[in-house]
Image: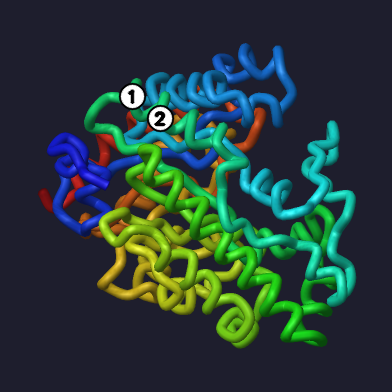
């Protein structure tokens, strides 16, 4: 990947490199989502998966969100799970239920029907969207590509959907380490090729989402997950910053750092200063306002955003975000106001 001077000198890239910035960069997880009227105008015409698989529409909602919010990065509109379809999983987005896999892997013997992707051409609609977005984005705004981390995808493959306690996933993990290793290796290999293709198409940053790994103990994460997350991150070209985001368990932050990433995402369950201390001084951090703050009045949002910035202490390497994705029915004007607040307040707190 060849970075233009505009991208290399953008505040987002400087923060990824832990360099001083004029103000704290900010973007919002799920920033192109149901809370935006502009998104709903597009979404009302097509099903969710059609939106994901139609490059022109995926590009439109990506670009609109960046422009409307004034954020410092765009994130590709896509979903974590369609990569599982060419791997042999029957995926459906059921109305009101979320994603459902109709042929989950329930036993060790079924792992062999999960195919590693030696080529990721079947996901070409993603790369087509990336090329459109990169062509239309302002030259100083990076495009973030992303994927689900191996454990999060494995849990969907095994549970068939979301889960409260991950009984099937952990049972396979504990009782048949060989089958678990095979599944995780196939996922990690496929994800590595997928992210490389996103970068080749025009993404300048990658975020890895480990949305479900918070259910694990540190010992289990170290043994059963870390090697495969590390494999995926190491597959990304070294000049491309990686944001490694794991939710639900601050005790895993040092291991998340060890798995890799230039920036470690913090969810709202940990104080930012404490989380950065757990990550260590060699990495930047992203986060970590509680998303539910956005339902409050503007003075409360401003105070709580300021608390996050104060916890960062003006250190280079902080990217402001929510501690998880924005919720679907949050007032859209509050999200816009938050971005403006961060830019205003951050200008007085950074070290540039």
Question: Can you tell which quarter of the image residue 168 is in?
Answer: bottom right
Task: State the scheme by which the image is colored.
Answer: rainbow
Q: Kindly identify which residue carries mark 2.
A: 131
Instruction: Choose top left, top right, bottom left or bottom right for residue 134.
Output: top left
Q: Could you say which is closer to the camera, residue 30 or residue 144?
A: 144
Looking at the rendered structure, the number of numbered marks drawn on it comes to 2
Q: Can the viewer see residue 303?
A: no
Label 2: few (<14), some or many (≥20) within 10 Å?
Answer: some
Left or right side of 104 for 15: left
Residue name at image x 41 percent, y 42 percent: 144
Counting from the top left corner in percent of width and height, residue 142 is at 31, 38
Above or below 343: residue 323:
below
**Depth check: 153 or 212 in front?**
153
Q: Secondary structure at mark 2?
A: helix
Q: CA distance from mark 2 to mark 1?
A: 6 Å
Mark 2 and mark 1 in contact? Answer it, CB < 8 Å.
yes
Q: Position of residue 54 (x, y in %)?
A: 60, 24
Residue 105 in the image: state x and y as whole percent.
84, 64
Q: Is residue 140 above or below residue 311?
A: above
- Residue at image location 56% in from the left, 43% down from the top: 121
Viewer-proximal residue, 225 or 266? 225
Viewer-side residue, 163 vs 305 = 163
Q: Mark on residue 135?
A: 1
In the image, 48: left or right of 41? Answer: right
Against 151, is 37 above or below? Answer: above
Q: Quadrant of residue 130?
A: top left
Residue 296, above or below 137: below
Name the residue at 31% across, 54% down.
240
Q: Residues within 10 Å of mark 1 (few under 14, many from 20)?
A: few
Mark yes or no: residue 87 visible: yes
- Give SS at disc 1: helix
């Amino acid at each position: 990947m060849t970075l233009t001077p505009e991208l290399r000198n953008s505040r987002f890239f400087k923060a990824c490199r832990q360099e001083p910035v004029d103000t704290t960069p900010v973007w919002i997880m799920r920033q192109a989502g149901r809370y935006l009227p502009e998104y709903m105008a597009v979404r009302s015409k097509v099903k969710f998966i059609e939106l994901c698989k139609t490059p022109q529409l995926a590009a439109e909602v990506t670009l609109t969100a960046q422009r409307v919010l004034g954020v410092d990065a765009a994130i590709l509109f896509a979903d974590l799970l369609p990569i599982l379809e060419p791997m042999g999983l029957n995926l459906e987005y059921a109305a009101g239920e979320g994603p459902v896999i109709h042929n989950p892997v329930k036993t060790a013997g079924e792992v062999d029907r999960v195919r590693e992707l030696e080529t990721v051409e079947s996901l070409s609609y993603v790369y087509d969207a990336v090329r459109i977005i990169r062509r239309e984005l302002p030259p100083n705004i990076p495009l973030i590509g992303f994927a689900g981390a191996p454990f999060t995808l494995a849990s969907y493959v095994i549970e068939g959907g979301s889960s409260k306690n991950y009984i099937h996933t952990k049972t396979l993990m504990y009782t048949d380490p060989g089958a678990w290793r095979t599944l995780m290796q196939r996922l990690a290999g496929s994800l590595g090729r997928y992210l490389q293709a996103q970068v080749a198409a025009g993404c300048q940053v990658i975020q890895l989402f480990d949305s479900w790994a918070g259910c694990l103990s540190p010992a289990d994460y170290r043994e059963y997950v870390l090697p495969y997350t590390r494999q995926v991150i190491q597959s990304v070209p070294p000049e491309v910053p990686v944001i490694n985001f794991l939710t639900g368990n601050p005790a895993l932050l040092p291991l998340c750092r060890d798995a890799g990433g230039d920036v470690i995402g913090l969810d709202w369950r940990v104080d930012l200063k404490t989380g950065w201390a757990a990550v260590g001084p060699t990495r930047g951090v992203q986060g970590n306002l509680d998303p539910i703050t956005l339902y409050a009045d503007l003075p409360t949002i401003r105070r709580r955003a300021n608390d996050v910035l104060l916890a960062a202490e003006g250190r280079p390497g902080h990217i402001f975000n929510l501690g998880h994705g924005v919720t679907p029915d949050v007032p859209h004007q509050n999200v816009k106001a938050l971005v403006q607040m961060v830019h205003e307040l951050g200008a007085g707190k950074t070290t540039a």
